Amino acid sequence: MFKHSNYEPKSRFERWLETRLPIIGFSYDTAVSYPVPRNLNYFWTFGGILTLMLASQIVTGIFLAMHYVPNTALAFLSVERIMRDVNYGWLIRYLHANGASMFFVAVYIHIFRGLYYGSYKAPREIIWVLGITNLLIMMATAFLGYVLPWGQMSFWGATVITNLFSAIPLVGTTIVEYLWGGYSVGNPTLNRFFSLHYLLPFMLIGTVTLHVWALHHVGQNNPAGVEITDFKKDTVPLTPYATVKDIFGIACFMVFIAYWVFYMPNYLGHADNYIPANPAVTPAHIVPEWYFLPFYAILRAIPDKLGGVIAMFLAILLVAFLPWLDTSKVRTMRYRPVARFLLLVFVCTFIGLGYLGSRPAEGGYVIAAQILTVVYFAYFIALPVVGLFERPLPLPLSINESVLAGHRAADPVSDRSIIRIRQLKGG
């Protein structure tokens, strides 16, 4: 009736607890003895990095909420007080602000790994959809958090982005008024955004838990893109093999974060956000945070307001449908040269849109954004077609074979050459 656990209780208390609440056995099976493919590379460490970043953002956010005042007359001053008067408040705030950017760095790399190695393909469709759901919740949380300092960019960013919902026929104006809590961005808006910004990360914990649960149910994908055929040869225990690699990857990423926090804490922000919000003065160039820029460029590339909003959300939602859009039976792009080239173009397009999103919406920038928007959506049309006609390279028969082939490729002298040399020497 119940799945047998690999954990063996070592004390009377552990045996008593295991028969009533097998939490130790569950933890052991999940974090110690769980089998993972033996050929995982460092791209797979970003799952652990994202877990750490989520925990960091929640902890630092709780401490910031203790001192923040969600009032339009006091919000900006409360942030300045955190920076100057609260013990280590500057560190907590910089960890939280830069942590949001680093969170998106990790999640975009994590998504790229899924795209390259086909981690969205059956039987992992639910894992992929839950991952895109996590991305959407992250985006909403980050946008709400960007408004809270109540600087110029915070105020005008909230005004511009919330106004987009007014393009929705029939209900758009009602949605905007509900978000604002009135007829303009003001104190009710700030209170709503603060409440939602505090709530959504805990919702994210729930969706991340489902994401990990689904992952552990069907098993992890691997660089070779082939399923496990022999658990003894193809897998290793999660601890210590994968755990040690995760710890090293997390340590390197922490050094990367520390560089931004201690040496360039304001580089990714906007100077106008250090000016208190003023509804009477519009900034010369309103831009969101860097991780929204590709989608912001798509929004501005469409001349029609409603069309821009639809295109912006469609740019994210189409990624969730990749399990059904990709028609190839081969999982990883390592053995799909044409699809790999398309993915390279797609990634370059995404980066290019990010750059154009930071530029003024005028002249050649708009034309370039329109061209790249067409290329971006063309990927989701080309991928199903390529999957039907592409000739993939030969796949390894198993994970173990791909590992051994990798070792032989790294060795300049093959086994056959060694035998030939010995024969010539008379050995």
Image (cartoon, helix red, strand yellow):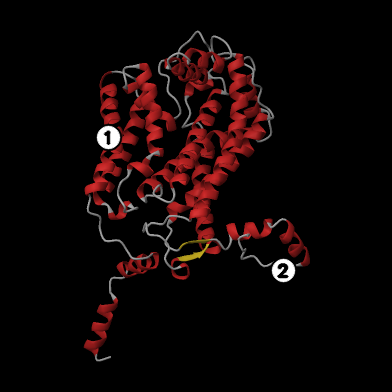
- Tell which of 20 and 186 is nearer to you: 20
> In the drawing, what numbered circle is on residue 57?
none
Residue at x 74%, y 57% (from the top left corner): 20
**In the rendered image, the vertical position of residue 105 relative to residue 314, given as above or below:** below
Residue 338, how many percent across, how many down? 24, 48
Quarter in which the N terminus is drawn? bottom right
What is the tally of numbered marks visible in this picture? 2
Residue 395, how many percent across, how many down? 30, 61
Q: Say what secondary structure mark 2 lies in.
A: loop
Which residue is denoted by mark 2 in the rendering?
10
Left or right of 398, for residue 206: right
Q: Is residue 76 visible?
A: no
Question: Disc 1 to disc 2, how far (Cα)?
Answer: 58 Å
Quarter in which the C terminus is drawn? bottom left
**In the rendered image, the vertical position of residue 140 relative to residue 344, given as above or below:** above
| Neighbourhood count class around disc 1 (C-alpha, 10 Å): few under 14, some 14–19, many 20 upward | few
Q: Amino acid at mark 2?
A: Lys
Residue 23, how many percent across, how many down? 68, 56
Residue at x 24%, y 91% (from the top left corner): 426
Residue 222, how many percent across, how many down? 41, 57
- Tell which of 279 and 89 is nearer to you: 279
